[in-house]
Image (cartoon, coloured by chain):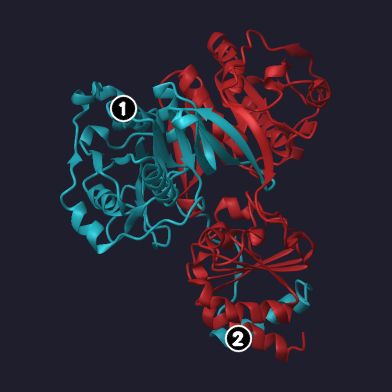
Chain colours: A red, B cyan
Amino acid sequence: MTKKVLIVLQHRDGRLHRMSREAVAAGQKLAAAVGGTASAVLLGAGVGAIAEQAAGYDLEAVRVADDPRLADYTPGGYVGALAPALKSEKPDFVVFPHTYQSVDYTARLAHEVDAALVPEVTGFAVEDGVLVWTRPILGGKLSSRVRVRGEGTVFVSVQSGAFPADGAAAGSAPIETLAEAAPAPDREILGVEKAGAEGVDLTKASIVVGVGRGIGGPEKLGPIQDLAKKLGAEIGASRPVIDNDWLPRDRQIGSSGQTVAPKLYLALGISGAIQHLVGMKGSGCVVAINKDPSAPIFSIARYGIVGDLHEIVPALTKALEEAGS
Amino acid sequence: MRIAVCIKQVPDTEARLRLAADGRWIDEDDVAFVINESDAYALEEGLRLAEKTGGEVVVVSLGPARVQEALRKALALGAARAVHLADDAYQGGDAAATARALAAALAREQVDLVLTGSQSDDAGFGATGSLIAGQLGWPHAWLVMGVELDDGGKSARVTREMESGLNEIVRLALPAVIQVQAGINHPRYASLKGIMQAKRKPIATPAPDELGLAAGAIGAAGARLEVLSVAFPEAGAGAEIIAGDPATAARTLVEKLQKEARVL
């Protein structure tokens, strides 16, 4: 029997979210692997132009719930819009981009339609007829292979960068209406505000020194600041450093902070959780210095030094002075 | 206001990890276990809200015997009592099976608010809190960076993180489940007095049948997800590791950045 894959698209500022295109790539690949077809679903108010954009992919259909109750995202709105169709059609797989928005409601929706949920998938393979999903655990230090037991719909959310958007096949899909959508917003939206104080714009720096929890404490920042000054670099930080008040929030890099892509990124004591990597993996050259050789940061770095950063950082400043750099 | 805080005990994120013999999880010997980071922030938020409203916090956790230590710590920080789902039947579940058990325990507590962390630092599903909300039929919010009570505790103004450096402020009707993001507050330290008092605070350990839970709905038996194996990232896929003492490694790195990568 033909398997059905449904891809839930997210959008922002009147366009498909970058990670929606990655979800399309993942959903198409999944449909091909299991012998099925992929359709997409789009929720919102006044989203005709976004639906046209989605229709440019190779999909069975783009199904749209265009409803004023979906103008703002709420879990109740999204669950109410999607659950009836999922209950009546029982797709084999529903693919979501792994975003802050989707994590907020996918578990709730899975509960509502009794689906299994595999969040933050980085890959999959059919092994002896069993679909096996790969996902990171322990902050990306390890990856795990998981399977879903029993029958029923399986939800997966795909991690940023795991299924590149340029892998999404173009085509021409018909635009249809999502049946039975019954959005029931369960939050009143009171407003939106900037998360951090206005301050440092790290995106303009050509060299960024990123510090993580591994630096040990704010009293250890002195030699790191010397190195940054020598390099003409801005200092950024991973989330735990900010949460502990070692540096102000306007220096946070990652999914809830700034996204930087300098020509050189020097990661000091940063283990490399995905929440940080999404904010800096576009950097030209990544150098990682960490005492843990299995830290995931090394997997995206070009150069690495395994050791005590408090010894290496002053040595690096000295080496730069000697090299006249 | 009666507040429940769900916490999980997880391996210390700074721990050096080895794989278990069966390759399906880490070897837990010699690993320090701590309260999951965002759960520690949720606990602090719960304690503050309880202090503000003259209420109390009950702390709830599912896990093996070692979890007692985490619960004692929460009691030392100011929680009034604890519920520990310690029975073997609860263990080994996925997020859905765990949420089913926690929701059943919470349903007995007659609480106005459930707080928990946004995500565990081990399995990292980010789902347990919203699954609990689904079980209880309450609204929820994930990645919360601020909670203010309104209408005499009938609703909450909740600040939740969005992407691209924005926060959204929403109103939730209570009771609700609020999934707290790390960094919302500054967790307190336990006082000596708190630690002494914690020794006498009660930890309930209800069995599944006391909570009306069928054995097949919880723990490993109730899980639909099965972990087949865990592994370290592929070796060799990553960085060129520069060897040598600090001075040598530093000189080599500078040379490579200048001549090979040409970024200096």
Q: Are marks 1 and 2 on the same chain?
A: no
- Is A246 above or below relative to A150? below
Element at label 2:
helix
User: Could you tell me which quadrant the N terminus of chain B lies in?
Assistant: top left
**Residue matched to label 1:** B110
Report the chain holding disc 1: B
Element at label 1:
loop
User: Could you tell me which quadrant the C terminus of chain B lies in?
Assistant: bottom right
Q: Identify the disc placed on residue A315.
A: 2
The x, y position of residue B21, in whole percent, is 30, 51
Q: In the visual, does A118 lie left or right of B190?
A: right
Q: In this view of the protein, which residue sits in the foreground, A4 or A118?
A: A118
- Is B60 above or below relative to A232? above
| Amino acid residing under circle 2 | Ala
| Amino acid residing under circle 1 | Gln
Residue A227 seen in render: yes
Q: Which of the 4 image quarters holds residue B187?
A: bottom left
**Disc 1 and disc 2: Cα gap in Å?**
59 Å
